Image (cartoon, rainbow, N blue to C red):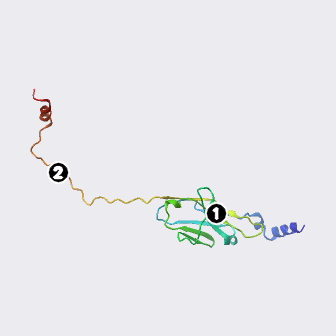
Amino acid sequence: MENVFHVLWGFLFFPSALLDKPFVRFHPPQLNLTEGETAKFTCSISNPDFGKHLNWYKQGHDRQPIKLDGSNRKYSFSKGDKCMMEIRQVEKNDSGTYYCWVNPFHPEGTILESNRGNLTVTEKAVATQPPDEITPVKEQDDGDRKDAKSSFSDLRGNF
């Protein structure tokens, strides 16, 4: 009976808390970059109190999550209204699927997993420079040339 009282009490004073299921959204869903650029992703959390325990992941080749380490200089994480992650100097092997998990850190809470975002990194095009100056090649006449008709008759012999 006491549990029913707590549920009713919560519904009276915090109706949105009981009706709204917390969520996490990952953005952008697709990001296409060239090697050397910086990838920027955000995780928006419906309840900012949940963002205290947010982790970023990349989906491994075996489909298992790989937790991204903030001590690695390649990754930068920030928290606030929107939690952000940057991947600096992206390389082709950074291509993959990324997402975040939030641990709400309360007794009834379960880990909230965001939608997924895909990063595609393409090779940087090698720049080619046009030649400075194009000089035409002039054919030299060495004086020993014969026209095609006389050369052909030389090969057949004179008839």
Q: Tell me which residue sits at (83%, 67%) in the image.
A: 7
Give coordinates of residue 116: x percent, y percent: 61, 59
Residues tagged 2 and 1 counted as in contact (Cβ below 8 A): no
In this orientation, which residue lies closer to the viewer: 130 or 7? 130
The label shown at residue 119 is none
Which residue is outermost to the front?
A: 62
- Amino acid type at mark 2: Lys
Give coordinates of residue 51: x percent, y percent: 67, 70
In this orientation, which residue lies closer to the viewer: 18 or 33? 33
Give coordinates of residue 69: x percent, y percent: 59, 69
Q: Tell me which residue sits at (67%, 72%) in the image.
A: 52
Mark positioned earlier in the residue sequence (2 or 1): 1
Q: Which residue is mark 1?
A: 25
Give coordinates of residue 8: x percent, y percent: 85, 67
Judge whether 54 appears above or below 97 on screen: below
Marks 2/1: CA–CA distance:
68 Å
- Please tell me how many numbered marks the rendered image carries: 2
- Amino acid type at mark 1: Arg
Judge whether 150 appears above or below 55 on screen: above
Q: Quadrant of the N terminus?
A: bottom right
Which residue is outermost to the right?
A: 1
Answer left or right for 39 relative to 8: left
Q: Which residue is mark 2?
A: 138
Q: Tell me which residue sits at (30%, 58%) in the image.
A: 130
Residue 45, by quadrant, is bottom right
Residue 79, by quadrant, is bottom right
